[in-house]
Image (cartoon, helix red, strand yellow):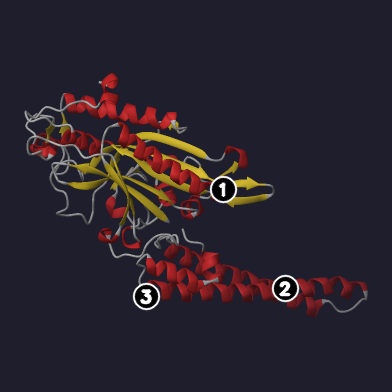
Amino acid sequence: MIDVKQLQKDFETMAYDLKRKGVEQEILDNLKDIANEAKDKRQEMENVTAEQNKLSKEFGRYKKEGLDIAPLQDNINALKANKQALEDEVRVIEDRLTSIALGVPNLPDECVPDGADENENIVLEVIGEKPEFSFEPKEHWDLDNGWIDFERGVKLAKSRFSALKGEAARMERALINYMLDFNRERGFEEWCVPFMANSNTLQGTGQLPKFEDDLFKIEGEDLYLIPTAEVSLTNLYNDEILSSEELPLLLTSYTPCFRKEAGSAGRDTRGLIRQHQFDKVEMVAITKPEQSEEIFEKMVACASDLLTSLGLSHQKVQLCTGDLGFSAATTIDLEVWLPGQNKYREISSISNTREFQSRRAKIRYKDGKKNILTHTLNGSSLAVGRTLLAIMENYQNEDGTITTPDVLKKYM
């Protein structure tokens, strides 16, 4: 969540940054009005408190000097009642302000380029060589090898579900194990977390309340299927105060992910690119503010090196403001080369959210006597289904068979 106190102190600067993120003027005007109302009402309450404290000091002198304390007591009681009424008003106004702020995205870092959408993202680096073929490479859904059964996936559930068979199922499992081992060797501690989360947990990382339509809700329960392990891993420390020595925390986990893909009608309806259920290995970091830049680079390098170890050409892309996620202050996407589609496609997204999620989830650390909000970071390492299809397209043979990357052979 954005810093509401900072919003009240320096509205114009924050409004400028929020406009870069695409927040509409009407929302900004509403935020400003309520922020000013809360600020004025709190000042009124503080003035009443100061007057009450002043009269309370006089009370002792009146008694000592034998003066009539009744009028003074009446004034003190009236101020006390007024203070209580003002406290209630401030609470209601600030609750309204918080409710609106929960739907406002994070501020973009200064380094994030302005842009309307993904077409204005900036390619930072291309890594690895694209494979060459003596035949026309096919898209993964056209490979005649029986690896993916789309029809039976739909029969079991609905559209955008699929079933993996034989070698594909084994390679999916191999990729999960390989990714977890790779991340663990880079210093990330492996966790096994629930695949469901309650509303407080999802609010902590920013999925609720704004993106409820994209979540699968468990009927009759305060539970949702998780859209990413970022939710579970980050909120392991929800409403906790960590010691300075514990940070940074580097975490990794495999989970299935569940997304309704609301608003994506007509996009990537074929193949494994955009499914309602998919496997992913996630990285999460919880750091001190001064550590987060270094850890961000470490996470980007980890995911990129993982792709390189699989022999997959990819590019690093800096997202512009128009393509930046709700919680992210800055994001680097990794896009893998898909020869069948003759284009790069997103396979990993690494984001630094600064203190945006920590403020929502109340994740702090103690520095001396002060409690300070941590920074949180997250990144795919990697989306397993997209990695599988990338291997299918990059390692395909003319007869439809798939060559196994060397690093996966011991897992197969």
Secondary element type, mark 1: strand
Of tags 1 and 2, the one toward the viewer is: 1
> What amino acid is found at the position of numbered circle 3 in the picture?
Glu
Residue wearing tag 2: 50
> What amino acid is found at the position of numbered circle 2 in the picture?
Ala
- Left or right of 245 in this view: 377: left
Residue under the point 51% across and 42% down: 237
Residue wearing tag 3: 26
Secondary element type, mark 2: helix
Residue 284 position, x and y percent, is 43, 41
Residue under the point 14% across and 48% down: 269
Q: Name the one closer to the observer, 130 or 326.
A: 130
Label whose residue precedes the other's in the sequence (3 or 2): 3
Distance between the alpha carbons at the discs numbered 1 and 2: 32 Å
Distance between the alpha carbons at the discs numbered 3 and 1: 33 Å
> What amino acid is found at the position of numbered circle 1 in the picture?
Arg
Residue 369 position, x and y percent, is 69, 49
Residue 27, numbered circle: none
Residue 79 position, x and y percent, is 69, 75
Quadrant of image for the C terminus? top left
Residue wearing tag 1: 364
How busy is the neighbourhood of tag 2: few (under 14 within 10 Å), some, or many (20 plus)?
A: few
